[in-house]
Each structure stands twice: as C-alpha cells, then as structure tokens.
Image: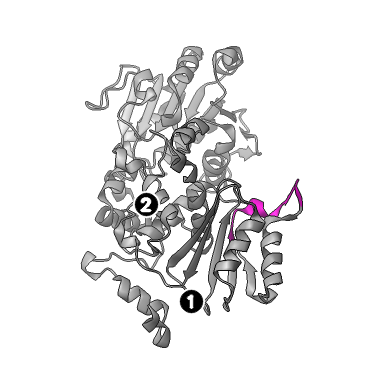
Amino acid sequence: MKFYKKYRPLLELNHSKYDFIILTGGRGSMKTGHCLRGVLKCAGEEPKRVCFFRETKDTLDDSLKAELHSLIDTEFDGMGFSYTKEAIRHINGSYMFFKGLKEINTASVENLKGVATSTDIFVVDEAQAVSKPVWDVLIPTLRKEGCVLIAIYNRISKNLPIEEAFFIDYDHKKAPENTYFVEVNYPEIEHLGLLSKQFIQRAELVKLHKPEEYGVIYMNQPPDQSMRTVVKYFTDENIVPVKYFKDETLILTMDFNVDPMMWCVCHKDDDCLYQFDEIVIENCTTEDAVGEFINRYPEHKGDIYLCGDASGNYRKTQSNQSDYTIVKNALLKQGYPINRIIQYTRSFNPPIVHRVRAFNQLVFGNDGVRRFYVDPRCKWTIYNMRNLMYKEGTSIIDLPTPNKIQNNKELKFLGHIFDAISYPAEFFWPVTLDYKENSKLVDPSEQWTMKNILERQFKNERENKW
C-alpha cells in the first residue's frame, strides 16, 4: 500500500498522539483515499468503532460509502471486512457507521453524546460545509479517551468555520499542539503513481485554458467572486447568429414551470449545441407553450427531439396526461409524424452538478473549444448565463426568493431556462471525472473558429445557408 509521508498520522490512529487530524487540498490530493485506507488498516488491527459524517447522510452513498466498499473489495479483500448498506464490520469486532451532520443542533446534543462516548474515530468529509454551530456542538462531545477526529475539507473560502473551530492558521500552516494539519495538492504526490494519466492530462488542460478554475479545483485556492457564476467562461464568443433549418433535427428542451414557462429550441451536431430560439411565457400552461412552438415552426420537416425535466413524464393532479404526452399529442394533431418525435429524457433528473459540469464543457471545454452557441435574440438564456450564481461559499445555486422577485421582476427568469438548456447538454454530452483517452492539449492558436464549426455542421449545400 503506497502512502504519502505527509499522511503518516493516519497509519497511527490506534496510538495517535493527535486528537484532531485536519486535511485539506485540491482534487487529486488523495486526502480522502489516504484517510479511508488509514482507518481500514487501524480497524483491522484493533477493534474500533468508527463514525463517518457528512452534511447529510444521503450524500455519503455516492462518496465515502462507495469508496470504502471499493477498497474492501480490492486492496482489503480477504482481510476480514464485510459491509451492508448501513455499516461495515470486521471479524475482530470493529464497527463503522454513517451519520449526517445537518440536523445537529442544541436539541440533539444528547443523542450526539451517546455516539461520541462510544466512538474511537470520527471522520468528517466535506468539512468546509459544516457550520460553526455544528462544530460547537460536535467538538465538546468528543470525550472518550484516545478518540480521534479527522476532518477533510476543500478551501472554498478564506474564512471557513472549520479553520476557526480548530484554530488553524492557514497562512502559516500552523495548528495547536494536539492537532495535525496538512495541505497536499496533486503535483507533490504525482510521483507516487496513484494518479491516472487521464487525471494529469485533464488537470494540465484546465491549467492551460482555465487558470483560475485550475487554482480553485486543483490547487485548493479560494475562488474570487467572479467564480460564483454557475456558467463559467461564457463570453460574447458564445453569442452568434444561429439560423433555423426546417429540414434538420430540432431539439425542443423544456422546463415545466408555470410562471414563467421557459423552453429552448436548438439544433445539434455530434460536437455542438446551437440555440436559435427560446419560448418564455409568464403564467402559462404546457398547452400554451407547445401552441406557441407550433405557431413559430408550423412547417418543420426534420425530427423533433424532446428533452428536459424528467418530472414531465408523470401525470399531474390537474391532468390525466403527463407534460410530454401533452406536447406529443399537440405535435401529432398539427401533423408531425409520430416516428419523427423522439423523446430523449432520463428516467429521473440527474444531479444538478452533472448538468452544470456538462453544460460548462460545452460553453468552453477544457481543451479550449467552445461548443455551445446561442442567438442574440435568446435574451433570457443569455441573462442566465451571465447572472446565475452560487450562494457564497457553497455549490448551491442562489435562486431568488419571492421577496427579491417582488423588488426585481427580472429575477423570476433566473434558473428555469438554465435547467432547460442543461438537460440536453448532460444527456448527449455527459461528463465524468475521467478524461477521454484520446484527449490532447490544444494550442490556443489552433482553436476552432466559428466558421470551422459551422462548416463541419452543415456541409455542402447547407453550409452556404449560414
């Protein structure tokens, strides 16, 4: 088992000289992987009771739980561990379980005390999201002799509750005597061979084309205010005249909000998404919106791809039909052939982070190429590209409250149209953390121009129509 020297205290948890071990670093620092390996090693040596915390228990399923299960099935296979959905056990009596921190408050202190008095190791993942009141409740409950708390966080801000709670002096990399604090970023562990070449290549692409994003994601640098925007690197280069072709496949992508209803109308090719229109109507039904679409494009001859909110597949209390059925029936009544109406939606909506990631790669990819273009007349789409933000210090989109909308009516148009345009981005161009094997660094001088892209999209007689 390869283990980076700066993470060594994680191998000594059974006889730790530290009460607190605080780990920070950007993507690829392997801080979580080292922590889990250290915990499994120590729990396999001596009976230990381990509690894994995250902000909510549900978010553990796709993160710590999945990684722990994978380690047990591979590196720790045959070493006495077994697991269920709720817990991990070892034949020596070690027991590991999972809890959410979000509900911890003064009313739940007694419950937390019961956990703390019988637990040897606490692991708090995504600790940057834990608030000061939660730390104020959690830390004083750690009273069992020899217990250790491990906190893993990303430095999303210069003023984080975790650094205040543990008296971390980040600028001088100092902590109290009973606390082990370390920052590791991927360049210093690259030599261990733990990072794939795809990861390194992706990081270098981001470093070349998006240095600010590289600093935030890979080098643990707090973002400036401009990095709060949901859509990164959207510029006037993404805004170009986009022509409608009645013989080409059309994407109608929908968010089924009543006020306002916001739909996007696009073309696509293998690489790019081209938005040439938007349908935005206040106090509107699905029937109203599809009626407006038919009025604008009554002679469409190509296929129509229906994309959007998966909840539109379900029947509503006010109708026996789902939103997608309403749209399909209206198109069929207009005379569109049924075999040319194709629905491309997932059975359930993907996590919004997946849609954001996929759409941002279209707006400006890590390879320096733009693959999303929007016509200037799509004013609400462009408004969202420039004004949709995250809440300060979080990855939660900052949607306006009713009071804010009352003071500024334009705010009611934030969010819904981004949802609409990001659904096909995620469906047709999903992005994972593994970079494609055939990706390569692209010199800025070799970036595609709009003319190149349009020539590739509509060849021969069609390219002259642009």
Callout 1 touching callout 2 (CB < 8 Å): no
Residue 302: x and y in percent read: 57, 77
Q: Residue at the location (65% across, 39% down)?
A: 85
* Residue 434, picture quadrant: bottom left
Q: Is residue 121 above or below residue 373?
A: above
Q: What residue range appears in magenta? A: 307-319
Q: Tell me the number on the disc at residue 61.
A: none
Q: Indicate the colouring scheme.
A: one colour
Q: Which mark is residue 195?
A: 2
Where residue 305 sits in the image (x, y, percent)? Answer: 58, 68
Question: Relative to 367, does residue 34 appear above or below in the rendering?
Answer: above
Type of amino acid at the residue the image marks with label 1: Phe
| x and y percentages locating residue 375 in the rendered image | 40, 64
Q: Residues within 10 Å of mark 1 (few under 14, many from 20)?
A: some
Query: Residue 343 vs residue 319: left or right?
Result: left
- Who is closer to the viewer here, 425 or 402? 402
Residue 437 vs residue 69: left or right? left
Picture coordinates of residue 412 (x, y %)? 49, 42
In the rendered image, the quadrant that contains the C terminus is bottom left
Query: Few, some or many C-alpha atoms within 10 Å of disc 2 (few <14, some 14-19, many ≥20)?
Result: some
Q: Amino acid at mark 2?
A: Leu
Q: Which mark is residue 245?
A: 1
